[in-house]
Amino acid sequence: MLFYILSTLALLSATQKPVFINWLRFVLIYVVGSYFHVYVVLSLLNGVYWSLFSENRYSDQRRVFRGLLVSAFVAFLVIFPGYLFLRSTVEYQMFSFSEAIVNILIGLGWFPINLMSPQHIYVFHLLNIYFQVLGLWLYVKTNNKRTVSWVLSSLFQVLMIFLVNLSTGYAFRARQLIFVLPVLCLLSASGAIDIYQRGYHFIKRCFLIKVSRFFNIKHIYVFCVMIIVLGISGSCLQEYYRLEKSSRREISIELIQRWKPNTVIWTTPHWEDQYYSFYLTLLGHPEVKNAIFGKENIQGSEDVTLPICWITDGNILPEEEDIMKEMGFEIVPLRSSPILDAQILWCR
């Protein structure tokens, strides 16, 4: 998120003043950020859309596009070899179209994280939809091309991520849309400010004109608006922080309780081992952490006679679950039932 914003700001500066030092700053931030997270690569599209919708002269547009092309070429010469070396060879089978659509709506702030939330929680998200649509309409109405182009660029980036997940089989998660948060906040804030100003002028004109000599109308109105906002969003925030997001901590505690010196601990997907290493270190059991190994699939336990604890994704396929049971594994019941990243602990 940080490098995506920094890269976007550096690119904005370069398109507004296309000189060598600005392009160099963008390339440096872009390259470093891309090695932190691949989504930073998408920030280049913001500059493309800004340039397409700009009101600059044709000669200035050519200059900006030339700088964009050269900067992108230089950056990809540095990024591409690293990505080839670090790329994952794992084949995923986690993508679900219906889950992807729901997670997109959650990522846009249109749905609550927990779809079983009380009905009053949905009021916050309905207002969010209304404010975002209103904010976009205001920018289109005022012909603010730069903001509209930023929105279009963000939507295109969401589409690209969706297609990449679809092609690789990786599960789409709402957190993958965090990079569009700035533009979503901008739209929501613009729509909310417009409603605020309309309401203030309406109340001032129709109701409070007689008491305006004794009370500061604006202060009273601001106070009432704050109470309403806190009332609507407070329960939503409370619901968000009350819900359990993952079962990793509970599984780590369960591993400590079941630990024996010869126990083997595996995690699938393989990168999950770093999460449990963190929790086990935090809980003061590095000896358990050292027994954890990541595995890319659920094969290969037939020749192991030692006790095994195997942690898999909560969305494990039915046929994979059958394989685990055939190999003698049993599910360890957990108290938590997280709504985002559920995991299953198997032991044999």
Image (tube, rainbow, N blue to C red):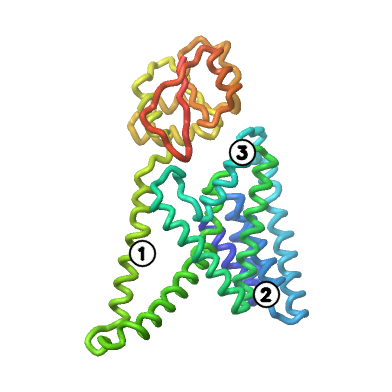
Circles 3, 2 touching at the beta carbon (< 8 Å):
no
Instruction: Judge by depth and name the residue closer to the eye, 245 or 140.
Output: 140
Q: Residues within 10 Å of mark 2 (few under 14, many from 20)?
A: some
Residue at mark 1 to residue at mark 3: CA–CA distance: 35 Å
Q: Quadrant of residue 10?
A: bottom right
Instruction: Judge by depth and name the residue closer to the eye, 122 or 241.
Output: 122
Mark 2 residue type? Pro
Q: Residues within 10 Å of mark 1 (few under 14, many from 20)?
A: few
Mark 1 residue type? Val
Residue position for label 3: 96
In this picture, is 70 found above or below 344?
below
In this picture, is 175 found above or below 154?
above
- Residue at the image point whose x is 61% and y is 74% from the top: 140
**Element at badge 1?**
helix
> N-terminal of the two: label 3 or label 2?
2
- Residue at the image point whose x is 59% and y is 79% from the top: 142
- Residue at the image point whose x is 32% and y is 60% from the top: 231
Furthest toward the left, the residue is 214
Viewer-nearest of discs 1 and 2: 1
Residue position for label 2: 18
Residue at mark 3 to residue at mark 2: CA–CA distance: 43 Å
Tell me residue 223's x, y (percent): 29, 72
**Element at badge 2?**
loop
Q: Which mark is residue 229?
A: 1
- Residue at the image point whose x is 40% and y is 23% from the top: 333
Instruction: Judge by depth and name the residue closer to the eye, 327 or 193.
Output: 193
Furthest toward the bottom, the residue is 213
**Element at badge 3?**
loop
Q: Residues within 10 Å of mark 3 (few under 14, many from 20)?
A: some
Tell me residue 74's x, y (percent): 72, 59
